[in-house]
Structure formats: structure tokens, C-alpha cells
Image: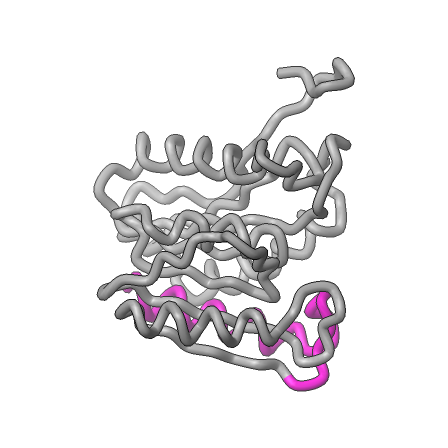
Amino acid sequence: MKDPLGRLVAHDLRGTMPDEAEGVVLICHGGGERGYGPMPWWEGPVLRMRPFAKAIERRAGNRLAVVRLKNRYFGWNGAEQTPLLDARWALEQIRERYAGLPLALVGQSMGGRVVLHLAGEPDVKAVAGLAPWIADGDPVLGRPGLDVLLMHGTDDRVTDPRRTERLAEQLRAQGADVTWRPVEGEIHSMLKHPRVWHREVADFVTGSLL
């Protein structure tokens, strides 16, 4: 596949995919508002999500498949919503291998925006939005039976924790089981208190799917 500048780009998946899995976790990384620069596996937003995958794997063992998505591009790119398209592609691959299993979606920043857009998918049981980018006009897809974890650093200056708290209230009003977790003193990178983020996400995902 080629990007608008004619460069070859590709989305990709990595992770553990045991045959005996009882559920699947899809992890989506962050990015920016615009950008068609390719996203290699060693870029910061992609690498930032690897410890979440490892924490879930340690907690769940072979009971969960844990898959990280690498997007084609850096940006959201307006109406094209390129990372959302990539995540839908990833879900197709997962459903082909694990038909009928419940899904949990975990995303940070732009990835948080992606997973919140996918919360209405019928096989999605749980969604974790970490310092999510929430924009005016984005869907609010709460429903009974959906477990939601929203975490945000109180010192985040990239995305707005107040928007995330309001979203928690809206999702709860629609019937979702919502946990709102502000992380005191944390910034957007989640690097001041990494163990808090990793532990709470792993607890949430395994508690919801297993």
C-alpha cells in the first residue's frame, strides 16, 4: 500500500495468540492530529504500549490473546480517520482467528480516541481509554454490559482530563460500567507513574474478560 507521497506503508500486528484464548485484547497507540509519515515499530507512541501488553500477558497467561496494532501513519488525518480504519482492519484479522470471543480495546491518546469510536462493536466487552484525545462531535457509545476504564493524568497538557471526566459521566448515563481514574501529577506520556497505569489496565482487562 502506498501513502499520498507514493511511499510504501503498512499496518501490522504483533502479540501473543494462544489457541486456547478465552478473549482478545487489542492495543492501539497514539499519534497526532495530522501526518502521513509512516509509523515503525520503534517509534515512541508505538513502544509506549508494549509494557501494557506485557503486563496483561503476565496477569492472564495463555487465557488471553494480546495484540498490538501498528498504524500506517502518524496522524488522525481529519475525515480520513486513518488509525480508525487500521483498527477496523485489525479487528477483522482478530475475528477471523478468534470468532465469537469477547474483545477488550486499550488505547492511549489518539489510540484512546480510536477505541472509544469502536466501543459500540457488538463483541467489544471492555474499553480502556488512557489520556484519550476526545474531540467535539465524537460518538459517545455507552451501553449496558460495556466495561469502561478512563484514566488521565491531572497534569496532562496535551489532552484534557476534564473532557475525559465528562465522558465518563455520559457513558455511565448510557448504562456502561465506568471507572474514572485520575492519576495525580501525571503527564501525557504516562512516564511518571508507569506501574500505576500498567497495573490498573491489566487488572481491568483481565477482570472484564476472564
Above or below, 10 against 51 in this view is above
Residue at the spot x=39%, y=70% of the render?
A: 170
Above or below, 156 against 1 in this view is below
Residue closest to the eye, 28 or 152: 152
Residue at the spot x=53%, y=45% of the render?
A: 68
Location of the C terminus by quadrant is: bottom left
In the image, residue 200 lies at what x, y percent? Answer: 50, 75
Residue at the spot x=61%, y=74% of the render?
A: 161
Location of the N terminus by quadrant is: top right
Number of on-image labels = 0
Extreme bottom residue here? 184
Q: Relative to residue 191, is residue 21 drawn left or right?
A: left
Residue closest to the eye, 129 or 25: 129
In the image, residue 106 lies at what x, y percent? Answer: 49, 57
Residue closest to the eye, 184 or 101: 184
In the image, residue 206 lies at what x, y percent? Answer: 36, 66
Which image quarter: residue 183? Answer: bottom right
199 in the magenta segment:
yes
119 in the magenta segment:
no
Residue at the spot x=41%, y=76% of the render?
A: 169
Residues in magenta?
Answer: 184-210
Above or below, 155 against 104 in this view is below
Colour mapping used in the image: one colour
Residue closest to the eye, 137 or 127: 137
